[in-house]
Image (cartoon, rainbow, N blue to C red):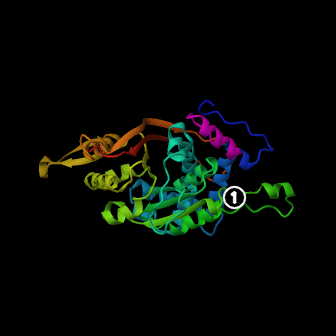
Amino acid sequence: MAPGRKPKVSSRTTANQVAGKVANIAQKSPESVALPTEVQQMVLDTFRRAFHPDGGYDVKAAIQQVKGHLFLRDFAAAFAKQEYLEAYALRWSASRALGYSDIFLHGDLQEVWLGGATSNTTSHEPSTPSATTVACIGGGGGAEVAACAVAARLYSLSKVVVHAIDIADWSSCLTQLENAMSTPPQLSAYASERAKVANKPLIMLDHFEVRFSQRDILSVDEKALRDMLGGVGICTMMFTLNELFTTSISRTTRFLLALTDVMQVGSWLLVVDSPGSYSEVKLGQGQDTRTKQYPMKWLLDHTLLEAAGGENSKWKKYVSDDSRWFRLSPSLKYPIELENMRYQIHLYQRIAEVS
């Protein structure tokens, strides 16, 4: 199937048949698989039900307040209230979830999901041995969590455990999102029996599990980092790494080196961020102070491919693209404005050290 082409789905095609077709295509071909419009709408409906835009506060006003705080880079204020968190999830996480789902279905990510991304050990209590374990750094807003649910559904994975790690307290929002993802939409009392039979949730709870840790990832010691990331098969940093570099290049570099030490051989690191992201470093002191800009991509490659292991690199880079687009279907329905997503993407696999 050519990249970007959708499998034809008749009005009688069930959700399970869609998932089966996508999974079969993925197993037979390394090419991209389009995210079915029906599933995209399910994701949007899930966010709408989880965060009820007609709830007990002025959603539009909250969105504008969050936007203002984000513009000033005042993240503490942007995520200081529960209504701000819900407004952010409604406004930004919903469309990002579709973009991330599209990334996970891309041909160059299928190996990550369909082979070698399992583990017997995760943080906290042990999971099902066949579980695909994912850690999402900066993933409290729920976009990565929802995209992982889509991957679990469309790749027909037996179990996916997602551990979101974020500096803000997203625990309540993620619980709301998990409940909405695992609960069928409410139907009219006059719905037909056929509609009732077809009414399924985005993901079944026995196939999906969400965990959350409220941590500043740059302040986590190695033991805690090992507890969180030592057993995962996939680690994602979606529109997060450049913010970390902007906060402190030295601390972020130390974090990436520590991450290298704790992640298991065969695991994957996926970095998605804004195209052309740069971070500044101050050089000199007093009147001699000047700044120099470094591309995030260069900082990332330098740290993982050169600093981490020297000549015997501990990472292999599989994907690097400076600019891609995810464009939303005009047929999608949502009560709040949605945005297309342009991004850069880099995928690495942790490899065995050469003795």
Badge 1: residue crowd in 10 Å (few <14, some 14–19, many ≥20):
some
Residue with the most extreme front position: 355
Q: Position of residue 143 (x, y in %)?
A: 54, 54
Q: Is residue 97 magenta?
A: no
Q: Position of residue 7 (x, y in %)?
A: 69, 36
Residue with the most extreme top position: 2
Along the horizontal axis of the image, is 230 left or right of 134? left
Q: Residue at x 64, y 53 (%)?
A: 44
Q: Position of residue 21 (x, y in %)?
A: 69, 41
- From the viewer's side, name the closer residue of 292 and 147: 147
Q: Is residue 30 magenta?
A: yes
Instruction: Kindly tell me whether residue 53 is visible in this rendering.
Output: no
Q: Residue at x 63, y 43 (%)?
A: 23
Q: Which residue position holds label 1?
A: 201
In the image, what residue type sits under mark 1? Pro
Magenta residues (range): 18-35
